[in-house]
Image (cartoon, rainbow, N blue to C red):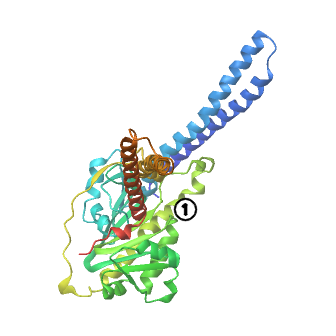
Amino acid sequence: MSTATAFDIAALERRRRFSLHAALIAVGVAIVGFSLGSSIGGSENRDTIGGALLLAAIAGAIAAPWIVRAWASFMRRRMLAAVVGQRLDLAHLDGETQQIESRQALSSGAFTLAAFRDSGLVESFDSAGVHHILVGDSGGVPFAIAEIALLDAKGFRLFGGVLASFRLARPRPGLTIVARDRGLLGNLVASAGSTIERLTLEDPAFEDVFEAYGTDQVGGRVILTATTLDRLKRLDETAQARGFRCAFLEDHLLVAFPGMTWRCSWWRIVQPMGAWIDRYRAQLAELIDVPVTIVRTLNLDAPVNASSSPAETVRPGVVVGSGSGQVFSSPLFRLIGEGGMPLIGVASGLIFGGVGLIGGWYGVTVGYSRNLFWPFWILIAAGLGYGAFAVASGVRELLALAWRWNAPLRSLKRP
């Protein structure tokens, strides 16, 4: 470990102990203040002292979680840089303070963010918010790994996690995708409506682990050897993300880890840095080294048809900003934001349509007077017409949202 990295870890450990002690003092003040403040009373002076103790207890109860949260936020910005500091083949970019460098890293030869829109790994997105990026070159394999959020045109998050891209020496024909097996029903739902075909894996031992798709059956089977699949399984186990997807697209190996984050969990404040930082560093190293070994193996193999290797596609750029300050960062916000208006439309349609049905039932069974006959029936027809239109439009939009939701394979278009 380099001297600078050792210093950073030591400084982080001192910051952890200071924050932990401050949080414990705040908790102690809250406990003692509430206990004494609620028991002191009976006279004007004692009531004043009790009130002051209760106010101090409230301040301590508020300060304790705030101190822990501030420490976790501090660690998010500092820890990753300290962890990767000992690797000469790796550099860390902070998406908040190094926005220009981050945009360049996400539109480079190693990592093209726009390629993920054509990969079938994520839903089609319009912009991105970046937290951290790791860029490097390991044994002649350029790569970049980004903790990132992908957003739609309305600013709702479609994907939150880590995206990685590793550059191949030569383009590969077609598109080959590998994802975790979801079972028979889950695989059918995930691939329904997609234009890509399922690939039968050469090794049946991996059929219960992965599901593979591809546009080139021969090329896909050449790539997905037993060795490659075994390394992908190892990568999936190392990442500990909510799912795992990868794609071989042209001259890139693209990997998506939904739900993965590099932020430091708040409960780490009670653990000394030495108890977990080495394990964290080893996990991060394997997250890089395993895909690199896959790329090196593929680089040694000749393409299926070298004379017809596809040229690299020119893709439009993606608007990239900082990942901090995202308001609509939860899937719940997207569900409310995109599904709220259709639900309101359905509800209004049911109300007006229901009133129209009640009025129509009354007109058929009882009847309206001659001077109210046409006005009422016109209103009834308008209510029924609006109700049917509003319900149909709302249901259609809700079904379209359900069709897009977490189904990236459906975003693939026929060439």
Q: Please provide percent x and percent y for residue 150.
A: 36, 56
Q: Please provide percent x and percent y for residue 49.
A: 73, 16
Q: Name the residue type under label 1.
A: Arg
Q: Residue at x 35, y 76 (%)?
A: 295
- What secondary structure is found at the residue carrying circle 1? helix
Q: Quadrant of residue 388?
A: bottom left
The one nearer the camera, 68 or 199, is 199
Q: Quadrant of residue 15?
A: top right
The answer to whether residue 242 is above or below residue 335 is below
Q: Please provide percent x and percent y for residue 297.
A: 36, 81
Residue at the front extreme, as displayed = 370
Q: Residue at x 62, y 51 (%)?
A: 271
Q: Residue at x 30, y 74 (%)?
A: 249
Circle 1 residues within 10 Å: few <14, some 14–19, many ≥20? few
Query: In this rendering, does residue 78 appear at all?
Result: no
The answer to whether residue 218 is above or below residue 314 is below
Query: In this rendering, does residue 353 appear at all?
Result: yes
The one nearer the camera, 267 or 408, is 408
**Quarter of the image where the C terminus is located:** bottom left
The one nearer the camera, 335 or 66, is 335
Q: Please provide percent x and percent y for residue 261.
A: 47, 56
Circle 1 sits on which residue? Answer: 279
